[in-house]
Image (tube, helix red, strand yellow):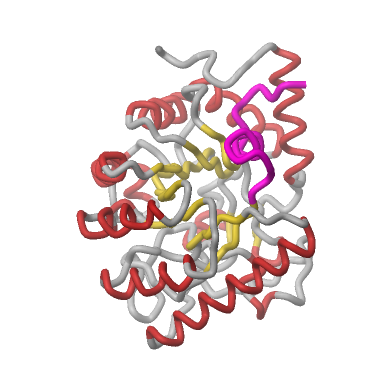
Amino acid sequence: MESPYRSYSEHLRRTYGQAVYRIGVDAHFSCPNRQGDGSGGCAYCDGTGSASTYLRHRESRFKHDSAFQDAVSAHAQREPMELAARIALVEKQVARGKQFISNRYHSQLYSLYFQAYTNTYDSIGALKALYDAGLEQGPFVELIVSTRSDCIDDEVVALLASCQNRVKRVWVELGLQTADEQTLSLLERNEGVKHYISAVNSLHSAGIGVCTHVILGLPGEGKDAYMRTAQLVNQVHSEAVKIHNLHVCGGTRLDGWYRQGEVSVASMRRHVQQSILFLRCLNPSIVIERMMCETPSHRLVSPRHFADKHQFLEAVRAEMHEKGYRQGDNYAW
């Protein structure tokens, strides 16, 4: 049965003729929203910088459904690392990632994904050296760089654009989270909607694709806020979206609010409903890369009982098929 939304896996198969797998890289970047001692940062960030679990070797003893351990400090400090060591780190991770994917999935199509922390927060020279270190181990069909909107400037855009002759497509992932400035201030993002719009416009002017991260279930937000966020994503012509359900990681400021009863998190059922509402407001051409978080349980305060990705996506598809809903059927053309 045809998917009621534009799924990422189907998009990749249509574009490249087969499955494409991401190789996530932690190039030891930092974040401008954190202090040198690791303090600060967004209210929901636990200091892992959104790195994949397989990149955090100290957590390898935990299983996905392990009991909560508060294993990662919200004030995790990254010790300085020389550029040469960072280059070697990238090369090692890419080699391991390619071997793992080849053995497990028997695929030869890869995307290079600079994932952890703010991957444009460095000098242009360092950025070029790190991107080159990964790309030289190609071929890759896509280069994907995750960053903050306030860390996109003309030099960064030019550097990313220069990589376009080495891959089929260059993408940048930007964390909008919400179109509501008051909520962004509460989360202590220290960047706003204007930064997001400016970054998207700059990237699009160079032919670079944009994937926008949003969080559903933020404090004080509901249907109207989700619709406004969807409208903004539509207006800037973001080509893809990652949807996250609000979740609470141990040791964060959000954790403190949750324990004081100031914040609630959505059940699976509620997140199914809010995700469908959001999808129905999105331009049907937008690719849906993700619809829920997959934070390992040993770091997760709440929600503790939530379906796995397969079960969640099946629930979304089943309800959309049952009610005749499709992505974009409430989109204002």
- Residue 9 falls within the magenta-colored stretch: yes
Name the residue located 61 percent from the left edge and 71 percent from the top edge: 55
Of 47 and 301, which appears nearest the observer? 47
Q: Is residue 159 left or right of residue 265?
A: left
Q: Magenta residues?
A: 1-20
Left or right, 331 with reference to 104 = left
Residue 37 horizontal/vertical position (percent) = 38, 81
User: Looking at the figure, which quarter contains the C terminus?
Assistant: top left
Residue 80 included in the magenta stretch of the image: no
Locate residue 73: give its quadrant: bottom right
Q: Position of residue 17 (x, y in %)?
A: 65, 38
x and y percentages locating residue 310 in the rendered image: 77, 41
- Residue 330 percent coordinates (x, y): 50, 14
| Residue at figure coordinates x 33%, y 41% from the top left | 207
Vertically, is 292 above or below 144? Answer: above
Residue pictured at 53% horizontal, 42% vertical: 242
Q: In this rendering, would 292 be left or right of 105? A: left
- The answer to whether residue 283 is above or below residue 19 is above
